[in-house]
Amino acid sequence: MGFSTKQMVIYATLMTIGGGVGWASHQYFAAGNFQTNSLNGNSPESAAVVYQAPQPTEVVQSNRPTSQNFIAAAVQKVGPAVVRIDASRKVSRQFDQNNPILKRFFGEDETNPFEDRVEQGTGSGFIVSSDGHVITNAHVVEKADAVTVTLKDGRSLEGKVVGIDPVTDVAAIKIDSTGLPTVVLGSSKDLVPGQWAIAIGNPLGLDSTVTAGIISAIDRSSSQVGIPDRRVQFIQTDAAINPGNSGGPLLNDQGEVIGINTAIRADAQGLGFAIPIETGWKIAQQLFDKGRAEHPYLGIQMVDLTPDLRERINNDPDTGLKINVDRGVLIIQVISDAPAASAGLKPGDVILKINGTEVATATAVQQQIEAIRVGEPLSLEFRRQDEIQTVQLRPIAFPAE
């Protein structure tokens, strides 16, 4: 079946418009609507396909608000009260500036690499009162000469470090302002692994960063976290916490502060740790009120007793000890002139109860002692050889140094 001259002209025109798109059953395919027009009568052979471009669809603007999840709602609630903290301090090189070698190679007109330098660090914090009380980590502002607090709205204010507590890694800062946004404090007492956790802070200098995950564990001891000198039972979370997050809040799904983000293990993969807000708030209140925090101190060093440890102690003649039980909290050292020494406690004693509460681990003993105020009477039950004894003592304040 041949083509007329007129058909060939139309087909050639369509091929030009179509940019080389192929043919099928003498019909031209593209994205649009098609209709067949007769070119010479009703002959099917003379039917050509005419392309009609689709009409643009009318765009309708929706007045409905963008849907929020609970994380976005929590961040909107707390975000304005989360601050960035920039701290700086001068570090002395402690070199003799009269050293003839330094003078020889670094004249007065040249930059001396051995001169004092300024170290800078960035952390996070959160506002707990409208008149400028801010909580952060002690290691963020420790030994800082200058502290700047930057709010989410862009304001930068000079901060005064009211006090720090290295034992719990909590610090208190005051800024001169009023009408500030504040966080809502929640509770960490009823946390269970699997609950939502939200972290807000300034990791790596990236302001107002939000990460979310779950509570992956509770009551992690400071020794488990890798900082045994701290007196904290940490919350463990897989919400991403990076350098710069320190001091920022850990939130629950209601946007309430349940912890203070503080520690990252160098070898961890997706694990971060936070100080429970009950501990952080208790210490912060002391810092704001008195500029220091007091921790009850008995003056003992202790370990969890195990059958293996008992065997090693009993088989080592240098210890001079014989332990008769496999479990408990073993005193391994008593500090002279401390309350424990004055009460007559000795290495080898096994602690059984604190104020009538049974304790099976060193962590449990520490928790019971932390619940007591400095100077308050404390009852301690212990086993010495086959005899169970009880002593009364009063904790003193934990030595600053």
Image (cartoon, rainbow, N blue to C red):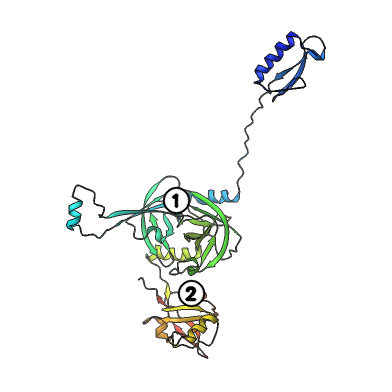
Q: Which residue in the structure is indicated by mark 1? A: 204
Q: Is residue 361 left or right of residue 100?
A: right
Q: Which mark is residue 389?
A: none
Spot occupied by residue 249 in the image (x, y as percentages of width and height): 49, 56
Residue sitting at x 33%, y 54%: 119
Q: Is residue 26 above or below residue 5?
A: below
Spot occupied by residue 344 in the image (x, y as percentages of width and height): 42, 87
Q: Which residue in the structure is indicated by mark 2? A: 366
Earlier sequence position, callout 1 versus callout 2: 1
**Quadrant of res 397:** bottom left
Closest to the observer, 21 or 379: 21
Badge nearest the viewer, 1 or 2: 1
Closest to the observer, 391 or 235: 235
Mark 1 surroundings within 10 Å by alpha-carbon count, few (fewer than 14), some (14 through 19), many (20 or more): few
Q: Quick one: quadrant of the N terminus? A: top right
Residue sitting at x 62%, y 44%: 67
Under mark 1, the amino acid is: Leu
Spot occupied by residue 277 in the image (x, y as percentages of width and height): 50, 62
